[in-house]
Amino acid sequence: MRLYWDEYTYPEIEELLQKNPLIILPVGSVEAHGHHLPLNTDMLQPLWLSEEIARKLNAIILPPIHYGWTDSLSSFPGTISIGFDTLKNLVRDILGEVVKHGGRKILILSGHASTAHITALRLASEEILRMHKNVKIMLLSDYYIAYQYRGKLVPEDDSHAGVIETSRMMAIREDLVKENYKFERREEKRYMVIPDYGEIVPYATFSNPKGASKELGEKLNNLILQELIKIIKDNFEL
Amino acid sequence: MRLYWDEYTYPEIEELLQKNPLIILPVGSVEAHGHHLPLNTDMLQPLWLSEEIARKLNAIILPPIHYGWTDSLSSFPGTISIGFDTLKNLVRDILGEVVKHGGRKILILSGHASTAHITALRLASEEILRMHKNVKIMLLSDYYIAYQYRGKLVPEDDSHAGVIETSRMMAIREDLVKENYKFERREEKRYMVIPDYGEIVPYATFSNPKGASKELGEKLNNLILQELIKIIKDNFEL
Amino acid sequence: MRLYWDEYTYPEIEELLQKNPLIILPVGSVEAHGHHLPLNTDMLQPLWLSEEIARKLNAIILPPIHYGWTDSLSSFPGTISIGFDTLKNLVRDILGEVVKHGGRKILILSGHASTAHITALRLASEEILRMHKNVKIMLLSDYYIAYQYRGKLVPEDDSHAGVIETSRMMAIREDLVKENYKFERREEKRYMVIPDYGEIVPYATFSNPKGASKELGEKLNNLILQELIKIIKDNFEL
Amino acid sequence: MRLYWDEYTYPEIEELLQKNPLIILPVGSVEAHGHHLPLNTDMLQPLWLSEEIARKLNAIILPPIHYGWTDSLSSFPGTISIGFDTLKNLVRDILGEVVKHGGRKILILSGHASTAHITALRLASEEILRMHKNVKIMLLSDYYIAYQYRGKLVPEDDSHAGVIETSRMMAIREDLVKENYKFERREEKRYMVIPDYGEIVPYATFSNPKGASKELGEKLNNLILQELIKIIKDNFEL
Amino acid sequence: MRLYWDEYTYPEIEELLQKNPLIILPVGSVEAHGHHLPLNTDMLQPLWLSEEIARKLNAIILPPIHYGWTDSLSSFPGTISIGFDTLKNLVRDILGEVVKHGGRKILILSGHASTAHITALRLASEEILRMHKNVKIMLLSDYYIAYQYRGKLVPEDDSHAGVIETSRMMAIREDLVKENYKFERREEKRYMVIPDYGEIVPYATFSNPKGASKELGEKLNNLILQELIKIIKDNFEL
Amino acid sequence: MRLYWDEYTYPEIEELLQKNPLIILPVGSVEAHGHHLPLNTDMLQPLWLSEEIARKLNAIILPPIHYGWTDSLSSFPGTISIGFDTLKNLVRDILGEVVKHGGRKILILSGHASTAHITALRLASEEILRMHKNVKIMLLSDYYIAYQYRGKLVPEDDSHAGVIETSRMMAIREDLVKENYKFERREEKRYMVIPDYGEIVPYATFSNPKGASKELGEKLNNLILQELIKIIKDNFEL
């Protein structure tokens, strides 16, 4: 079974689009996630979800955007942040072509949840929606759902590279997760603009991953997946 | 063995970069390739080459750019062309970050060989090179090498979705290649600007794929790979 | 006593800047706030706060930016939304000049709290901070503080044109507040991108203002002011 | 009586716009005006005129744009010049929204008369007029009218921060005018591009303000007002 | 004798630049000039002057920019107006290269005197001057000088396609001047923004050319030339 | 006989355009061509061809664009390279106006054949063609045709400033061609991005001009002209 848009020939995709399927655009970020998680952490999570959703809802997955806006972590080696306008224009161009070919139900699923990053995706979406009244776009980070479990399954302050993220990655690609993490979070002045978060979290880890486990990761992945499918069905009347 | 930049943690990539390795940016195109080849044809070929090169030369592969500039085919369903400036800025932003973190030897390998597409990659590269004198960038499409076999292993006029491309795809992902192709190429006025090639090649196939075979594909892939490695070694003194 | 930057002559401002004062940039939005509140609601609140802060901390207030990004309400008559890039560039240009003349401690105080609007302000700030290491910028909407009183002094779901905003406006400019409001909030699909909020809140009122009073407004204004001054003193070591 | 657009609620402004009123956009500049005049000199003058016109002609005043293009004075402390494109886009965005809501008769009144500044306002206006044939835009600096009194009520060479401007400011906000001015004007090579006028007028005063008085200011303000109202009535058939 | 920059080989121009010569950039406009004057009227006049100046002062003439900003006449057939930003960027790019190769004394001479057109040239010049303190740029239209003869040698209201321009063209390229002109100028509302001047001057002639003659043209050309040379010598200390 | 668009008055050009003539836009480059050829080499060749074509086919020639994109040679004195976007926008603006006035058959003839330069012209053309279905644009460098004679009339590797170019210039403007040339071409690594070709060809000459002659130039010019006219007639049905 093929899940990805670009695994089809053009006459095949033409036929598929006539059924008005859900089309998923997974967006990641190449971004430091501590000493214990790989740089593709924000890509692998929405890709796992996208594939599960595609299987269950006959959705088609667009080729992923691996790169996102993550300026505040870009001093950490390996992090690759693309410009806000670059990201916005990239998503707008892709959505424009998808809609041109008949796509009407679009889910943008981003592993990275930084406000500016999501705003770039939102501005691109709004530009398309203003021109095409019969199109629907759903936009979220899976972390919007994941963070509902803070104070329940995971610590109240769980965040970037913390228990949720570490657990989920253990469930998805255990081989890429390192055992030894480093964590330190310095006091942050409220509301100050911080262009480089290296000053606050010297190891690119925003909350302590202690307590993460593969089992918790599988549980969280499935809880998020169920919730996401429920919302998608409701939103797109699938 | 990990081949991709984003499969590493940030301290790992920091360490790797100190050895000054070759860094490969694979660029594709989501583009109609006839009734017989999938839309990711221009991505899978440079990805196959990138992985082989990475294994042999200890290179690191950046997350691929799946989308390219392919306006002249964007009337075919499923084709997704991003803007010239979007592509140029995307590549420039990525290269800028790679160089910031210490990358000095960069290979941009594009499956898509359209002149405007390659020009976008070139302008991005030149912008980086002007600011960083100690960086080297090699830029090509694997089709620059493949076309050396025209009139030898394949027909003189072999082109987009023809014998080379079909054979190579059979060798790389046979399951995605369809048996029945359609081919027609109408006469083209010389030097006229044609914004939509659908007028010339109604099935998005520029030359007849007849005679393609998996064996030929394997042979071509390996010839291209050998040649490419030779050039890379020479250019980067590896 | 003069509070505003532009009420001084240039030699006077030159002298004032040598004391390294706090410099406040108030940002508003010309935006529908129901049948009961004027379009300048998001400007008058941060202006009131700015003047109080200026009096207490010898801060200087820059000429306000009356216009903000508020696309999702721009179908309501009278709303004036400027482009995201326009707002970002405007703030960047102003900050650049302030810093050129020696400003080092800057507070951007926005009455409007829409995510995209604040992101524009943030991107502008980060651009300046990357070029000037000795500058500090604090950025917030007074509603970040105001919403701490949700579920305490005001309803849990209080929002745009609701109890807080109506009360505060009664305390600041009672003459501009109308008695009769209209409120309706339709169900909103979760995570859908909505370019025009007129579909959800047909009267541009996101929560019921019932229960608003001048006394509550005065109380809230003062609570916000105290909290804000405390944070400012701490952040800028005043 | 409310004069400003943003002092109304959205249903009120909707109703007002149905009468097709004159809508005034006052534009200023935060700009050095010698040792004797405040930085808001170019804002207060058109604001005074706007309010008088609004009272007499039932016009509505848009929230003012305090910042203008004034690069050639931006080396003087306190001067804040925004980019040419920033100013052009800001005015275009505002005009676009005003016209969207039904505004048809627009007066842009700028206190600052620098050619580049006015050109930015003109280009923005022309862009709107090309899209909306039923809209009329009048654009001027009050100094276009004021300078008609050169060689009559004031010296022939009166200019920036000179007799007219000082007198008018004494009439409008006497408390902001200082007694002691400094004036020096060095010889200027004809037609040379001068990016920084500090070389020519070391005190940001282009003509000697000697002889300025509140009485003259009141007289000039009223002469300009009468003339302006006459032209407006004629142009917009009010 | 070669007058133009691009008639030299690169080693020749390198040698010439070491003498720090005056470098002239002639700018025209492809623009309707009534029924009697050709579209290149605004190019031929500054070219004639440039060549005379080059001969007398050993100046070098850059290849001319034939196209200018002339939106308000672009409804007349044959008029070609380029965008404001296009013109600004074109001039900035050219100046940047000239300065890179050592040019220090630059004269931009524009036959077209529209305010927006000249502003584009000015903004480009200022951008270069801010980066290169040892460069001098003189910018004017020859009409700034020509109009000094209004009310003296020609009518007080002489303007676009009137007596001066017709006479000068008769002296420069008599063969391109037609005998029969058409002139009508309708009343213009003061200060209204007029995106298309076809409404005011239906024959693209702003003042009556009656009385133009070749002799007057030769006289004017020489007066302008003398004055221009005097100013240039003074400004650049030649 | 007038050949150029701008030698006509606007009513004349209006009349001419009603016959739907071929309209030629000649594009050059101010660019180092060795010690023996002038900087305008890439402009004079297409101008010669344009004038011959105009005479034979009653075509109209637009004012030429003297400046092109030639970054890789811009370290050589006298070379003036304009930005890629500047060139693209300039051509797009000109084409847009020509089409607005009724031009339907357009030939863009560029003396400079650099890929990026031609791509800028192509992107501009495509933008216009997408908006205007009844317009035809032919785009080429005369060197596309000239290079057909490589290995026949001239050496196989003939290139920039070599035998063809030197011979053609001798036939067109013998007075601008110097006798003594300098030639050296260093080995070039394949596929490396080279922002400055000065490293490879220290005298801005890519192939040895030895053997060039005026006779060969006349022959080549005429061969190219005949071929070009044949293609034009065929493409535009003249």
Image: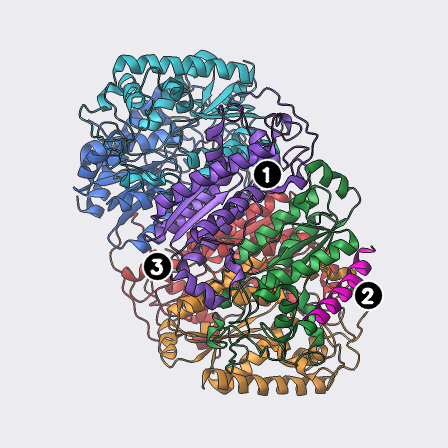
Chain colours: A green, B purple, C orange, D red, E blue, F cyan
Image location (x, y in percent) of residue A47:
65, 58
When the figure is inspected, residue C23 is found, relative to residue C116, above or below; the finding is below
Q: Which picture quadrant has residue C141?
A: bottom right
Nearer the observer: mark 2 or 3; the answer is 2
The residue carrying mark 3 is: D155
Mark 3 residue element: loop
Say few, some or many: other residues with alpha carbon within 10 Å of mark 3 (under 14 / 14 to 19 / 20 or more). Answer: some
A234 part of magenta stretch: yes
- The chain carrying label 2 is C
For this rendering, which residue is in front, E118 or B112?
B112
The residue carrying mark 1 is: B171
Image location (x, y in percent) of residue C77:
71, 59
Q: Distance between the residues labelled 2 and 1?
A: 56 Å
- The chain carrying label 3 is D
> Looking at the rendering, in which quadrant would you find the C terminus of chain A?
bottom right
Q: Which amino acid does label 3 sit on?
A: Pro
For this rendering, which residue is in front, C32 or F175?
F175
Query: Residues at marks 2 and 1, common chain?
Result: no
Say few, some or many: other residues with alpha carbon within 10 Å of mark 1 (under 14 / 14 to 19 / 20 or more). Answer: many
Image location (x, y in percent) of residue B189:
55, 20
- The chain carrying label 1 is B
Nearer the observer: mark 1 or 3; the answer is 1
The residue carrying mark 2 is: C186
User: How many numbered circles does the render carry?
Assistant: 3
Q: Which numbered circle lies on residue F38?
A: none
Residue D149 visible in the current orientation? yes
Q: Which amino acid does label 2 sit on?
A: Arg
Q: Residue furthest front?
A: B215
Magenta-colored span: A217-238
Nearer the observer: mark 2 or 1; the answer is 1
When the figure is inspected, residue F113 is found, relative to residue F174, above or below; the finding is below
Q: Distance between the residues labelled 1 and 3?
A: 88 Å
